[in-house]
Image (cartoon, rainbow, N blue to C red):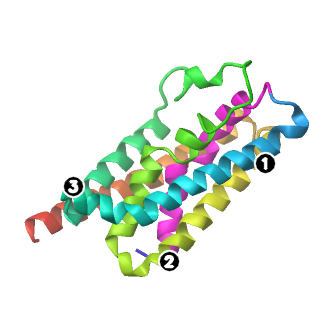
Amino acid sequence: MTLFSAALLLFLVMDPFGNVPVFLAVVAPVAPERRRRVIARELLIALAFLLVFLFAGGSLLAAVGISEATLTVAGGVILFLIALRMLFPPPGGIFPADTEEGGDEPFLVPLAVPLVAGPSALAAVLFIMNSDPERWPEWLAAVVLAWAASGAVLLLSTDLVRVLKRRGLIAIERLMGMVLTAVATKLILTGLADFFGL
């Protein structure tokens, strides 16, 4: 896996285009002049979670005795389920309970976790780091690049909705889901081949 492919994988898993409507709904009660500041704060919290999992993930895997082949297959299955969700979203959205207006200013949940640094993104970070721990500077760069790209999309969410409209965002999310399906399939096949020694 290269730096670019790792960053692309993480970007797809974070699914910023799919999260735009949810982000806008959650920050709706916040004063317009504070919305971008709130989003930026939540993005920084999400980055902290991602970095903790990046560097502590190896110890976690060693503690529970998970092999690289097992993690590869598990990561592929998780990514495949995420891709299906992107291609065929459930009625009412992915997080319908989080889209209600009103209430206090969001903190940590649901913007930072689970929308940016969700279980799927954390699992992807663990998988990437475990694939070759010696290349941790590259994986760190990949996490930061994917996070920065996702953050740019979410910080510009209001402008994106105005330009792309809802159908445009849905089309981009479907395209990302198709790419992620192919990546997930490759991971599953690679993991199975390693497990059976093929």
Whether residue 148 can be seen here: yes
> Is label 1 in a helix, a strand or a loop?
loop
Q: Report, in whole angstroms, how far the alpha carbon at label 2 lies from the one at label 3.
A: 25 Å
Which residue is found at the position 63% from the left and 45% from the top?
17
Which mark is first along the chain, 2 or 1?
Answer: 2
Q: Report, in whole angstroms, how far the alpha carbon at label 3 lies from the one at label 1.
A: 40 Å
Give the residue number, with chain letter if any, for mark 2: 138
**Is 185 left, or right, of 139 in this rendering?**
left
Crowding near pointer 2: few (<14 within 10 Å), some, many (20+)?
A: some
| Badge 3 vs badge 1, beta-carbon distance below 8 Å | no
Crowding near pointer 1: few (<14 within 10 Å), some, many (20+)?
A: few
Q: Amino acid at mark 1?
A: Leu
| Residue 103, placed above or below residue 85 | above
In percent of width and height, residue 101 lies at 72, 19
Magenta stretch in the rendered image: 2-29
Give the residue number, with chain letter if any, for mark 1: 156
